[in-house]
Image: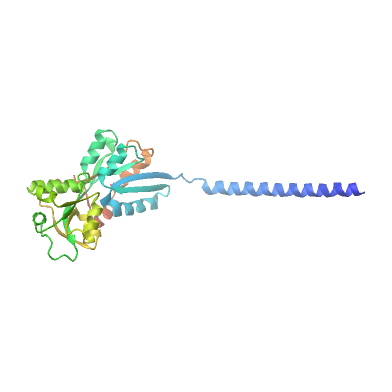
Amino acid sequence: MKNKRIRRAAMVTAVSMLAVLIACGQTESKSEKETGEKNEGKKPVTELTVLAAASMTDAMQEIGEAYQETHENIEITYQFDSSGTLKTQIEEGAPADIFISAATKQMDELVQGELVAKDSVFPWLENKVVLIVPKDSEDGPDSFEDAAKEEVPMIAIGNEDVPVGQYTQTIYQNLGLLENIQAKANLASNVRQVLDWVATGNAPCGVVYATDAQIEENVKVVCEAPKGSCDPVIYPAGMVSASKEKEASAEFLEYLKTEAVSEILEAYGFTPYQS
């Protein structure tokens, strides 16, 4: 009798366990089905890495946000620095899909080395080189020529690897004042560092792009570079040859040419390139 009761209890337990397993299986199947239905039709996320000149920081972030509103499957990662530094990173094999330079020199060199696809490159926008001083400055230089005088103890400029530094060197070379400037130049690793030094009063004046000066309330523009003292400041954009997302990169580059992007650029002081 006792053995029968034990057998019955074992059977009840086995049936109960079977029922639980079946229920769990049905729940999992339902969950998997719902998940599948939820993900059905959604494109996988594509990551784009954009290397852009430091002066593009604010504008590019807004452009990226606008692009992702209509391209939910695209995730954009930015790296902002001097064009020379970014060029070196591409040469050393750093992951990148798109390169935006603040000068044609760095882009041309990468194209020559077949590290940027030649047929993808286009002149995208223009900027201007300006002399700035701290906002409350009353006795700062009034011109590029004044900044070279002995009365001005220091000037902040980009180093020779930075496009704005290269433009500055050309300007002062053409003005016949390069030696004066080199003797008191405080060299920065990118244009935003120049901007910061002047904004904080650590430098009495500096040379930056007009767009940088526009976003910093603690500086004021003294003047633009003398006409003809340097080449037009053109920013080219192109696809890195080693990009693993060529289709998505090409689509984003085309987006940069749209009217919507031109409006964003103009709001930041850039001028869309006119051939």
Image height of 118 relative to 270, above or below: above
The residue located at (25%, 41%) in the rendering is 122
Residue at the extreme left of the image, as rendered: 176
Total marks in image: 0
> Which quadrant of the structure image shows residue 237?
top left
Rendering coords of residue 269 (x, y %): 22, 56
Question: Where residue 39 sits in the image (x, y, percent)?
Answer: 52, 47
Give the vertical position of 64 relative to 136 (above or below).
Answer: above
Quarter the C terminus occupies: top left
Image quadrant of residue 253?
Answer: top left
Residue for point 35% across, 51% down: 64
Q: Is residue 264 left or right of residue 144?
A: right
x%, y% of residue 135?
A: 19, 64
* Viewer-closest of 152 and 171: 152
Q: Is residue 244 found left or right of 120 in the rendered image?
A: right
Asked whether residue 229 appears in the rendered view, the answer is no
